[in-house]
């Protein structure tokens, strides 16, 4: 014979078995929902004639679905509970700061120097940073960015610093 809950509070208990999955799912679902909501201020269009809201709406909806799946996985997980680790704001500040520096310096330093700065500054957010690897990656990304955006896509982005291009 199975026990039937006698009070509503006993029947409505939700157990989070894997905090990392649960909160990751919540985060994905919330960000996806925000994308969908904010995109609705633009014209959606159709699959044949996509409006500016089409891509963010589809992508946001997929993110909500992914978030719900991960959230449910966190509720039904059978392994030992993994606590959510302390959030580290330092690495986030380095990465976001590098993007700001990239945007602020692109016009004056060109794509090669700006990309080099982006990769170098963002890598400072890692405790595993090695200067030789960072310099190699920075140079490689600068060259790849040049090949893709300047040579391949023929974009009119400054390549060299302003004082060198005149």
Image: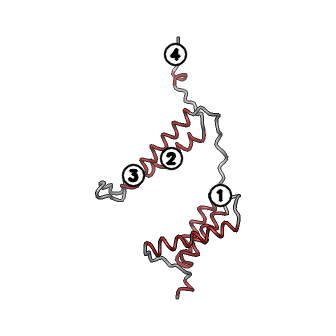
* Residue reaching furthest to the top: 1
Residue 78 in the image, given as x and y percentages of width and height:
59, 31
**Residue occupying image coordinates x 39% and y 54%:** 39
Label for residue 28? Answer: 2
Residue 132 in the image, given as x and y percentages of width and height:
69, 68
Q: Which residue is mark 1?
A: 91
* Residue reaching furthest to the bottom: 166
Q: Which residue is mark 3?
A: 57
Q: Mark 3 or mark 4: which comes first in sequence?
A: 4
**Residue occupying image coordinates x 52% and y 78%:** 159
The quarter of the picture where residue 75 lies is top right
Disc 4 and disc 2 in contact, CB within 8 angstroms: no
CA gap between label 4 and label 2 equals 35 Å
Q: Which residue is mark 4?
A: 4
Q: Mark 3 or mark 1: which comes first in sequence?
A: 3
Q: Mark 1 or mark 4: which comes first in sequence?
A: 4
SS assignment at label 3: helix
CA gap between label 3 and label 1 equals 30 Å
Disc 3 and disc 1 in contact, CB within 8 angstroms: no
């Amino acid at each position: 014979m199975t026990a039937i809950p006698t009070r509503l509070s006993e029947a409505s208990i939700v157990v989070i078995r894997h905090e990392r999955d649960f909160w990751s799912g919540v985060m994905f679902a919330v960000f996806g929902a925000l994308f969908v909501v904010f995109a609705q201020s633009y014209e959606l269009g159709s699959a044949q004639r996509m409006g500016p809201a089409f891509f963010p709406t589809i992508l946001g909806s997929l993110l909500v679905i992914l978030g719900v799946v991960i959230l449910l996985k966190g509720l039904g997980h059978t392994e030992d509970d993994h606590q959510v680790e302390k959030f580290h704001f330092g690495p986030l500040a380095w990465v976001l700061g590098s993007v700001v520096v990239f945007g602020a310096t692109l016009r004056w330093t060109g794509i090669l120097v700006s990309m080099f700065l982006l990769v170098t500054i963002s890598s400072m957010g890692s405790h595993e940073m090695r200067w030789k690897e960072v310099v190699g990656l920075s140079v490689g990304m600068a060259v790849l960015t040049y090949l893709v955006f300047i040579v391949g896509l023929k974009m009119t982005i400054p390549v060299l610093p302003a004082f060198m291009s005149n």
